[in-house]
Structure formats: C-alpha cells, structure tokens
C-alpha cells in the first residue's frame, strides 16, 4: 500500500512541479539569457524590484512587530477587533491594495480632491505603499504567534531588578525574536519581489522584474525571455528557504509561557497607533464600498446600483462562480493531499518519510508567477489546458506547503503510540485515522481548508497565464475593469472577493466553536 502511495505522490509532484519547472529551464539558452540581462529594461527592473521590496519589507516588519507587541504586551481594549482589522488585507488580492491607493490618492482620488493634495502615488512610492499593505498582515501574524509563546519569567526578574523597559526589549525581546526576524525578512522580501499585482496597478513607469515577466509572457508571448525572468524570481524564494533551514528554531522547553507577559495598562500612544493603523487599513475597503454604489466616483456620490448591475452583466457572476468552484476544489483536494502527506511523514520512518517532507516543502520556494508560466508551457497541448481543473491544480501545488506544515506540526503533538495500540488490538489504520486522529486535528483541518480557499479565491499570480482560455476567475476582472477605466466595477469585484472570504471565515469559525462544545 505504501508503495502505491509513494508512486502516486511521485507522479503528482513530477506532473505538478518538476515537469512545469523543467520546461522553464529547457527554454533558457545562453543567447536568450544574455539578451534578457543585457536589455536596457532589465537593470532598471532589477534595481526597482530589489529596492522597493527591501524598503517595503522593512516597513512591513516594523509595523507588524509594533502591532503584534501592542496586542500581546498591553491591555489594549478591543484586541480581537484590531486583530480582525489588521488581518483584513489578507482577504483581497494584492492588486486591490494598489487600486485602493489609486482611489484615494490618484489624480482623481477622493482624498486628493477633498484635501487638494499634490501627490504622485504612481511609481516607487505607490509600489512601496501597496506592498506594505499586502505584506503587513503576514508579518503581524508571524510576530503575534511568536510573542504569545514567550515566557515572561525573565521579564519579571528584570522588572524586580529595576531594568528599564527599553533595555528589556533590547536584551530579552530582540534576541528571542532573532530567528523570526531573519526568516520573516527573507519570506516577505520574496513575497513582495515576486508579486506583480501591486506594481502592475500602481507602478506607472517604474518597471519591476515581475511586471517585465508578465509583459513578456502574457502580452508578447515571449516564453523564452519569460522563462529567464521566471527562474530569476525563484532565487529570492530559494534564498528564503535556505535561510529558514540554516536558522532552525530553538528547542521548546517544558516551562515556556509559565508567566504571562500581557501588560497591566495601555498607554494613549498604543491606542493612537492601533487606531491610526486600523484606519489606514480600512480606508481602501471603505473606498471600495463607496465607489461601488456611487454614481460617478468621486464627482457624483449619489447612491446607485448601476455599477453592480453593469458588473454582473459583464460576466462577474459567472466568474465569481468559477472562482468559487476553483476555491472549493482547491481547498478540498489540497486539504486531503496535505493531510495524507503530513500523516505519512510523521508516522513513517526512514528515507521515504524524509523525501516526502522535502517534496512537501519544495513548493514554497516557487513563486506563483513562475509556476503559472511553467504550467502554461507544459500543459498547453494537453486536454486539461483551458479548463477549471488546471486552475485548481496550480493553486493546490502553489499553496500546498503551508497547510502541510500546519498539519505536520499538529500531528507531531499526537503520540504515535495510538497506531501501535491499534495494531496490537487488530484495529485497521484507517479506523484509527477516522475515529482518533481526525477528531483531534479537526481545527487544523478547518484552518487548512480556509488557507486554500482564501488564497485560491484571490490569487492572480499563477492563474493569470492560464485564463483565458480557461474560465476566468473573478480576481482577474480587476485588471480588466481598470484597463477599461471602469473603476466602480473593479471596486465591486474587490468587495465581492472580500465578502466571499469573510463569509467562509465566519462559517468555519462557527464550525470550530461547534467542534469545541
């Protein structure tokens, strides 16, 4: 049985990862590589990508750490509310963040007109701002989860000894966060530098490598140059992967978190910071709502349903159903596949388990923009090309690693003696999994399902190369409407994606509470 399982996994990874990537490398020639590198656009795009990603990463991490510290180290009122607000940008496509900035600060933006601002949001400033909105929630949740696990005993001792708060932060908090800061920096930098939604919408004349790849592969169908750029964009993600492996987490001790670190008070500065940050995050979302129902934003703000009706007539409802089907399929298949591999890698010893684990974390080193191009080239003449199936497949492989690690970490906390006892009693493994393992990991399964669903619903990176001819997902209509200057329709699409993901989150939260009863 295990041989059949291993053979099936091998086929899936060969077809879903290695073969598409292999087609990218096969299209790279020395002349083609030299042509791309020596082109006048390349050096400028490389500098723009690295510089904007570096600045946006530093800002995102600083804001994320500050927000996480406020929620975990103070008695700030409404912590759950702020956590929801700070995580809201994760529920809409990256391109929507830039679109929100344009709606607020563009040439005909709401704040631009009201405050008579002379601001050029397009270019480097816009890319950095949009990337920060896109990456901040990721940094926030990483730091929040790490700070929640820190033991407060050293801080209590330092307080008794009269050590100032700043020294406690420098000497205790920063060393504790060292590994997290390093791994988060590379992860977010890779995430920003490979995203093309933000620079495509708000970059203006500031070209980045991801946009250059998009222009070459999609607009010009130059797959040779696109393959060179796609492989280059794999490098930052590969560096992040290696840095994470070379910087292993410290071993957990049995006395972690034996003293709470929640502060006894919340200063006015903390409240102002969180409220201000929350308003900056909510502003684009509110703008989307206003634009959707405004007669002519921002000239005529009278309420109307015209833009909603027009958006539906232009195919938004059909594309929403496409996205819903893709997201559900990706979530169901991805959750089952992730669980199967996580269970195998934690319950089987030897080389096979190590190989499965290595294969399972490999997809996190591949940007969606590169994987999508590989799928376009490899599957172009196959029956699956041009169907919803290929869109669901690329999403499963693109987002697979994180849910796998979620489940692996959960299964490692469940004693393997459960299977041993079942074997002694003659209980088949499938019944052990059904009656013992699955009930224990049901909360993680819900989180895995939500991760696949939300990301499949809003992604534009991998699927942009495959639709059309495949049925178009809803998220891709944002660029379509923006190009046609139908800003109100683009806003309606962003709101539809946000409401869909919020609904899924609410349903799963209620399901988890029901499980907990």
Image (cartoon, rainbow, N blue to C red):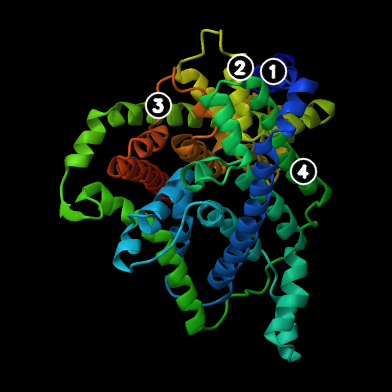
**Residue 224, percent from left and from top:** 67, 21
Label number found at residue 239:
4
Q: Compute the Cα span from label 2 to label 4.
A: 25 Å
Whichever of labels 3 and 2 marks the residue nearer the N terminus, that label is 3
Q: Is residue 160 left or right of residue 486?
A: right
Label number found at residue 23:
1
Q: Residue at label 3? A: 325
Circle 4: element type: helix
Relative height, residue 404 to residue 198 (above, below): above
Check whether the beta carbons of the residues at disc 3 and disc 2 lie within 8 A of each other.
no
Check whether the beta carbons of the residues at disc 1 and disc 2 lie within 8 A of each other.
yes
Circle 2: element type: helix
Q: Is residue 36 left or right of residue 305?
A: right
Q: Which label sits in the foreground, 2 or 4?
A: 2
Label number found at residue 382:
none
Whichever of labels 3 and 4 marks the residue nearer the N terminus, that label is 4
Check whether the beta carbons of the residues at disc 3 and disc 1 lie within 8 A of each other.
no
**Residue 425, percent from left and from top:** 69, 29
Return the residue nearer the eye: 37 or 51. Answer: 37
Q: Residue furthest front?
A: 40
What is the crowding at mark 1: few (fewer than 14 residues within 10 Å), some, or many (at least 20)?
some
Relative height, residue 145 to residue 445 (above, below): below
Label number found at residue 377:
2
Q: Is residue 195 left or right of residue 166?
A: left
Check whether the beta carbons of the residues at disc 1 and disc 4 lie within 8 A of each other.
no
């Amino acid at each position: 049985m295990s041989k059949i399982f291993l053979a099936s996994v091998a086929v899936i990874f060969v077809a879903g990862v290695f073969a598409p990537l292999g087609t990218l490398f096969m299209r790279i020639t020395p002349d083609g590589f030299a042509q791309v590198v020596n082109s006048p656009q390349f050096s400028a795009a490389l500098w723009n990508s690295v510089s904007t990603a570096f600045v946006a990463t530093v800002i995102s991490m600083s804001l994320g750490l500050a927000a996480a510290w406020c929620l975990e180290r103070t008695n700030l009122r409404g912590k759950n509310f702020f956590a929801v607000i700070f995580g809201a940008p994760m529920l809409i496509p990256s391109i929507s963040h830039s679109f929100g900035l344009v709606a607020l600060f563009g040439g005909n933006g709401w704040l631009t007109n009201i405050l008579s601002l002379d601001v050029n949001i397009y270019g480097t400033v816009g890319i950095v701002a949009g990337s920060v909105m896109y990456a901040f929630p990721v940094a926030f949740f990483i730091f929040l989860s790490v700070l929640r696990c820190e033991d407060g005993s050293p801080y209590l001792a330092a307080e008794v000894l009269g050590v100032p708060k700043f020294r406690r932060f420098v000497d205790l908090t920063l060393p504790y966060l060292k590994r997290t800061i390093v791994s988060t920096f590379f992860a977010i930098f890779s995430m920003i530098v490979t995203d093309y939604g933000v620079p495509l919408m708000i970059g203006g004349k500031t070209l980045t490598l991801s946009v250059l790849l998009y222009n070459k592969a999609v607009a010009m169908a130059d797959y040779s140059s696109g393959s060179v750029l796609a492989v280059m964009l794999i490098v930052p993600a590969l560096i992040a992967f290696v840095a994470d492996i070379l910087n292993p987490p410290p071993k957990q001790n049995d006395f972690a978190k034996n003293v709470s670190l929640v502060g006894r008070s919340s200063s006015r500065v903390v409240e102002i910071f969180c409220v201000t940050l929350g308003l900056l995050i909510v502003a684009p979302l509110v703008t989307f709502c206003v634009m959707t129902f405004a007669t002519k934003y921002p000239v005529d703000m009278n309420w109307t349903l015209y833009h909603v009706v027009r958006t539906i007539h232009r195919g938004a409802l059909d594309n929403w159903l496409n996205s819903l089907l893709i997201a559900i399929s990706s979530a169901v298949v991805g959750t089952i596949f992730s669980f199967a591999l996580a269970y195998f890698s934690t319950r089987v010893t030897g080389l096979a388990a190590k190989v499965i684990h290595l294969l399972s974390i490999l997809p996190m080193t591949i940007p969606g923009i590169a994987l999508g191009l590989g799928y376009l080239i490899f599957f172009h003449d196959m029956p699956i090309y041009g169907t919803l199936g290929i869109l669901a497949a690329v999403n499963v492989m693109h987002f697979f690693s994180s849910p796998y690690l979620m489940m692996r970490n959960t299964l490692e906390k469940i004693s393997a003696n459960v299977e041993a006892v079942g074997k002694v009693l003659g209980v088949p493994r499938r019944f052990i999994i059904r009656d013992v393992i699955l009930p224990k990991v049901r909360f993680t399964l819900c989180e895995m399902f939500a991760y696949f669903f939300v990301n499949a619903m809003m992604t534009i990176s991998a699927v942009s190369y495959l639709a059309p001819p495949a049925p178009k997902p809803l998220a891709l209509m944002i660029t379509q409407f923006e190009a046609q200057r139908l800003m109100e329709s683009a806003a309606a699409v962003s709101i539809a994606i946000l409401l869909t993901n919020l609904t899924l989150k609410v349903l799963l939260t209620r399901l988890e509470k029901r499980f907990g009863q």
